[in-house]
Each structure stands twice: as C-alpha cells, then as structure tokens.
C-alpha cells in the first residue's frame, strides 16, 4: 500500500476557537500501482484537504496517514525525525490554483525548481522541462515567458508540467482540467492515462466532470461534508439513487441513452461508454 | 439597441503577440451572449478591456452609448459587474461579508441596504454560514460562489461571468445557471465566458474567438451545429449532435431521430 489513511480527522484551526472540521473519520488505501482514481464531491466537501494529506502538506488532527511506510501524525514534524522531502517527490501534487505553485521569473525556472529541489542535475531538469512543456500542450517558446503573464488555462498547464518534471510515483491532481478547453482537457486526460498505462503509475484526479469519471476512472471516491461516502466502481455509483443528494450528476452519455430509450421506445441491452458505442446501438433500432 | 459596441479593437501585452486583433462585435441590451474559444484565445483580455482594466492599442469600445476613455471609465464600471476567472483576484476584504459588500460600497449603496443584500445574496449562493470566515479559508468552489454573490448584489445592468462556475459541483453550477437565466429574464445583459456547450446553449448568441480574432458570431442554434468551427477552436459538439453527425455520415438518419436529437441538445 502506498498511502493509507487510518481514522483521519482534520480540523482547520481558527482564531476564535471555533475550529472547522473538514475531514471526518477517513479510512482509505491507495495502491502504488495501477489505479486511476477520480475524487469527486460537493464544493467544500473536503477534496482538496484530503489530497493535501497524501504528501504530508498537512497532517491529521487525529488518526494517521502512512505514506510509503512513513507514518504521519499530528506532531510528526515537531519530532523532527521524519524527512518529508522524499515523500513530496514520490507523491506529486498539483494544486487547484496554479498561482499557488508558480513563483519564479520564467516558466523554465518554475518547472525545473521541483526536480532540482529533489537533487536532479540542472541540465537534466532542463531537458525534462523541454519535454513536459510539450506534453501539456504548450510549445517550447513558453519556457522563456513569465508564469504570471499567462492566461488561466496556460498557468494551469505550466503548474502540471512542473509536477510531471519531478517524475513522481503517484500523481495527484486537484482539478487539473477545470478551466481548460475541451480539447485541452481531453489531451491532458489522455496524457495522464498514458502515464498510468505505460508506467503503471497510480493517478488521482479531482474533478467535477462526471463524463471524465465515467470514461476514465477505475475507481471513484466521493466526499460529502467531510465524510468519504463512496469508494467503488463508477458504474455502480451512477446507478445509485442518492447521487443527487451529494450534489453530483449523471454522465451525459448515460442521460442521453436513457432519454433516447424513452423517446424511441426501446431498451438497449447495454449502457454505452462512448458515443461510438451508442451509435452502434441506435443503428440497430432505426 | 446595442448596449456594448466594439469596433476594430486590438491589444497586445508588452508588444508580444497580439492578444486581440481587430475585434468588432456588439451586444444588445437584455441579450445573453456566450463567448467561447480555446485557452489563450483572448476571452479574459476582452472582458478586461470592456471594463477598462486594460487599455486598447487601437479601436473603440462603447458602453450604453458612451465611449470608454479615462473620463468615462468610472461611470462605465458602475454599469458592468465582472466575475473574474480567478476568484482570488476579486478578494480584498478580511471576511467573506466584506468581500460581498465591496462592490456595493463602491457603488455607494446605503449601509442598511448593504447589510440586507449581503444576507440575501449569500443565501442565493448557499454561503450564509460562511459570512464571518476569511476568504482564504474557503475551498475553490466556495470562493467562486462568494465572488458571484458580490457581483450579483451590485445589480449592474451588465454582468460578465468569466468561467465563473469552473470549480463548482454539478448542482451548484446548475443553480447558478438558473439564477443567470432569471436575472437575464429580468432585463440584465449577460456575457458568459465558458467552454461548456451545455452552458452556451442557454444563451441567445455565441461569439467564438480564435487566436485573438472573432471567427464566428451568430445565433446559438446555428453555431451549435457548426462542427468545423467548434473543432477548430478546441471546442466540442453537444453529445446528441455528435450522434447526429455519426448517423449522417452513415446515411442512417431520419427526420424523427434528427428532431429528437435536436430537442435533446437544446435540453428540452
Ligand atoms: N485554510 C482554511 N481554514 C479554514 N477552513 C478551511 C480552510 N481551507 C478550507 N477550509 C474549509 O474546509 C472545507 C473543505 O475545503 P476543501 O477541502 O478545500 O473543499 P473542496 O476541495 O472539496 O471544495 C470547506 O468548508 C472550507 O471552507
Ligand atoms: N498579463 C499578461 N501578460 C502577457 N501576456 C498575457 C497576459 N495575460 C494573458 N496573456 C496572453 O494573452 C493571450 C490571451 O489571454 P487570455 O485573454 O487570458 O485568454 P483566454 O481568457 O481566452 O484563455 C494568451 O496568449 C496569453 O498568453
Ligand atoms: Mg478543492
Ligand atoms: Mg480566461
């Protein structure tokens, strides 16, 4: 097991003493290899808080998170025995807001910052930067630009490139595709899928896009008001009745299949995953 | 009557590539227009030019008959509210409450009115419980909700939403879209910048930007079906229309199916 949450509770402290409980009794295991996980749930349900535990950016208020054999608890850092740096290299986390991750003068410096920090030679890091910038759909010219003078979608891509350049074992992405155009979104999801398939790495993606969940995920986690309320297969999740109460929705392909069954007065044998599959079914009945 | 008229507008950041080139477009009073386009096509730049946060290199912007310039920018900003793409750029106050109040204070609303409106609009975006919190202590989607509340409360004639629902959960997004429908019906001119065709379908008209130029502009129903233009701008057809294309290609379509798929696209 690469990451294991045991009875994790997390409270955000506040000055007036009314601490806010953002995670409640989370138990969760993430395998090092082979998982493609999507994490979904209502705005404010605790998704970003949860993933920040996965590389020890924040520590549980009670309970523990074990990351590659290292147990992280409330006072872990204070004891000073544990080195967190290696964990941060192995579990790469892309933040929801790229602005939190970009601070150098140029895009190049931003991308090589992570690898260099983890002991990669500068020349090697630069080579990696030239590769990853293309992988996220920007050309090499962008390496010279200032990360602050980019559009929202471009910043997002640069922040993803910075983590890819660290070559982490597990890739955790907090809403990597929100704000990207549809082609950019699909290209990036294919990139993550490629990393997952070719290198058998575990990828965890936070998203609000149910289509992404249905199309790509082998496992889906649902957060609701600080609780992990579902951990299982996407197909089963979307056949549940209570998903609306979690502020979720049904993927478009399922909605339109149901609507078509209704309007054409037919029953398809299977639930298609892609528009091509739906086309094959519709072909037979018209 | 056109409430916004833009003529031959060009802009580049620090002499780099042009972010906008010769953009000409107009928005009618009471209309709902979607602005679409690939990442980096110039959508946010356009909205910042309209409210006078950036100054055009050439061309002209008229809002409600008044040409935008140094003298008129203040008056024009009273007419246009904008929800920025990154909600952090909207936040200036110490608490959520302050942030919702900020826009109204700039417009010199009465203090008692402001207090009522904070309550009313926080309620509308489901953020009533968070009024005393610090904005940085909110989740991404919560920040977006607060930013939206602050702008709605200003009750300006025109509102621009720059990818304002990108971090909201499906239900939250739906409720904001319903609310936009409502204010648009009540006469507010709305410009939504989005990549989501399910949102664009709600608007009257669609404008598509590509590399800083307007490449399409027309009734929503016409643009929805324009596969080539959409694809060339990194956008996608609505799912029922994708299916229609596959059926057409295979010569399998008929009028009944076509009609059903069209109705499903319009979400009827
Ligand atoms: N720094 C913070 N201080 C206090 N409360 C916070 C802080 N960050 C987040 N929260 C609260 O914790 C809850 C969970 O936030 P988050 O994990 O960001 O949600 P999500 O990513 O699912 O939208 C939210 O209700 C939010 O208001
Ligand atoms: N502050 C800035 N300085 C320099 N270039 C910028 C700045 N902001 C945006 N750009 C560039 O201008 C172009 C248009 O950006 P923007 O209007 O933000 O695009 P969109 O909102 O359509 O994604 C992009 O190529 C982007 O790199
Ligand atoms: Mg979040
Ligand atoms: Mg933008």
Image (cartoon, coloured by chain):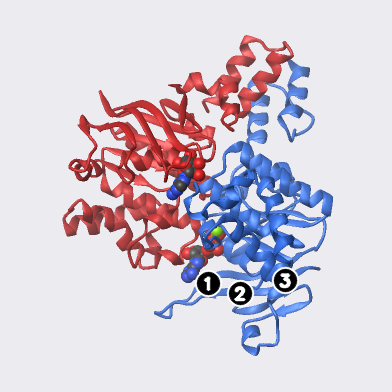
Chain colours: A blue, B red
Q: How crowded is mark 3: few (under 14 residues within 10 Å), some or many (20 or more)?
A: few
Q: Is residue A208 visible?
A: no
The image shows residue A185, relative to residue A161, as above or below, that is above
The image shows residue B50, relative to residue B124, as above or below, that is above
The image shows residue B236, relative to residue B118, as above or below, that is above
| Residue B100 drawn at (x, y percent) | 32, 57
Q: Quadrant of residue A90?
A: bottom right
Residue where numbered disc 1 is placed: A21
Query: Looking at the image, do the residues carrying marks 2 and 1 touch, with CB atoms under 8 Å apart?
Result: yes
At x 65%, y 47%, the residue is A136
Q: Is mark 3 within 8 Å of ligand 3?
A: no
Q: How crowded is mark 2: few (under 14 residues within 10 Å), some or many (20 or more)?
A: many
Between residue A136 and residue B259, name the one nearer to us. A136
Label 2 chain ID: A
Which of disc 1 and disc 2 is earlier in sequence? 2
At x 68%, y 45%, the residue is A134
Evaluate whether label 2 is on the same chain as label 1.
Answer: yes
Residue where numbered disc 2 is placed: A9
| Residue A164 drawn at (x, y percent) | 70, 56
Q: What element carries label 2?
A: strand
Question: Which label sits in the foreground, 2 or 3?
Answer: 3
Q: Is mark 3 on a helix, strand or loop?
A: loop
Q: In this view, does A63 lie to the left or right of B30?
A: right
What is the spatial separation of the Cα atoms under label 2 and label 1, in whole angstroms?
Answer: 7 Å
| Residue A41 drawn at (x, y percent) | 59, 54
At x 26%, y 42%, the residue is B156
């Amino acid at each position: 097991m690469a990451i294991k949450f045991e009875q994790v509770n997390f409270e955000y402290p506040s000055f007036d003493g009314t601490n806010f409980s953002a995670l409640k009794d989370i138990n969760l295991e993430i395998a090092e290899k082979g998982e493609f996980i999507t994490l979904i749930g209502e705005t404010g349900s605790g998704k970003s808080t949860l993933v920040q535990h996965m590389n020890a950016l924040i520590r549980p208020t009670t309970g523990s998170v074990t990351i590659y054999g290292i147990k992280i608890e409330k006072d872990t850092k204070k004891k000073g025995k544990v080195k967190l740096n290696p964990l941060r290299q192995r579990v790469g986390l892309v933040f929801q807001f790229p602005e939190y991750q970009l601070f150098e003068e140029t895009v190049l410096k931003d991308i090589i910052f992570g690898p260099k920090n983890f002991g990669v030679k500068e020349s090697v890091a630069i080579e990696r930067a030239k590769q990853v910038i293309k992988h996220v759909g920007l050309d090499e010219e962008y390496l010279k630009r200032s990360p602050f003078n980019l559009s929202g979608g471009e910043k997002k891509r640069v922040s993803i490139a910075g983590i890819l350049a660290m070559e982490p074992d597990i890739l955790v992405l907090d809403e990597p595709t929100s704000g990207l155009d549809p082609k950019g979104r699909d290209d990036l999801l294919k990139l993550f899928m490629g990393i997952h398939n070719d290198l058998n790495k575990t990828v965890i993606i936070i998203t609000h896009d149910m289509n992404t969940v249905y199309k790509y995920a082998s496992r889906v986690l649902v957060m609701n008001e600080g609780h992990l309320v579902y951990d299982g297969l996407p197909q089963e999740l979307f056949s549940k009745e209570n998903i609306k109460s979690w502020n979720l929705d049904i993927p478009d392909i399922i909605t339109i299949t149901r609507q078509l069954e209704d309007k054409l007065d037919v029953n398809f044998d299977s639930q298609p995953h892609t528009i091509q599959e739906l086309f094959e079914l519709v072909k037979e009945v018209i | 009557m056109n409430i916004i008229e833009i003529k031959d507008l060009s802009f580049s950041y620090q002499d780099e590539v042009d972010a906008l080139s010769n953009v000409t477009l107009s928005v009618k009073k009471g209309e709902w227009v979607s602005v679409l386009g690939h990442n980096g096509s110039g959508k946010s730049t356009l909205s910042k030019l309209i409210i006078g946060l950036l100054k055009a290199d050439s061309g002209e912007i008229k809002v409600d008959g008044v040409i935008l310039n140094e003298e008129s920018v203040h008056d024009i900003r009273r007419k246009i509210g904008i929800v920025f793409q990154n909600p952090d750029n909207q936040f200036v106050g110490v608490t959520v409450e302050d942030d919702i109040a900020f826009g109204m204070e700039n417009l010199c609303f009465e203090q008692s009115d402001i207090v009522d409106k904070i309550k009313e609009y926080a309620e509308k975006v489901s953020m009533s419980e968070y009024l005393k919190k610090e904005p940085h202590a909110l989740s991404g989607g919560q920040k977006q909700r607060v930013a939206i509340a602050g702008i709605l409360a200003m009750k300006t004639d025109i509102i621009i939403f720059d990818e304002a629902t990108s971090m909201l959960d499906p239900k939250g997004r739906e409720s904001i879209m319903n609310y936009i429908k409502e204010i648009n019906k009540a006469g507010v001119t709305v410009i939504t910048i989005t990549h989501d065709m399910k949102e664009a379908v709600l608007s009257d008209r669609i404008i598509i930007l590509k590399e800083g130029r307007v490449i399409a502009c027309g009734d929503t129903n016409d643009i929805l079906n324009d596969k080539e233009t959409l694809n060339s701008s990194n956008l996608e057809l609505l799912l029922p229309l994708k299916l229609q294309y596959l059926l057409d290609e295979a010569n399998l379509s008929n009028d009944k199916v076509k009609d059903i798929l069209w109705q499903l696209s319009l979400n009827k």
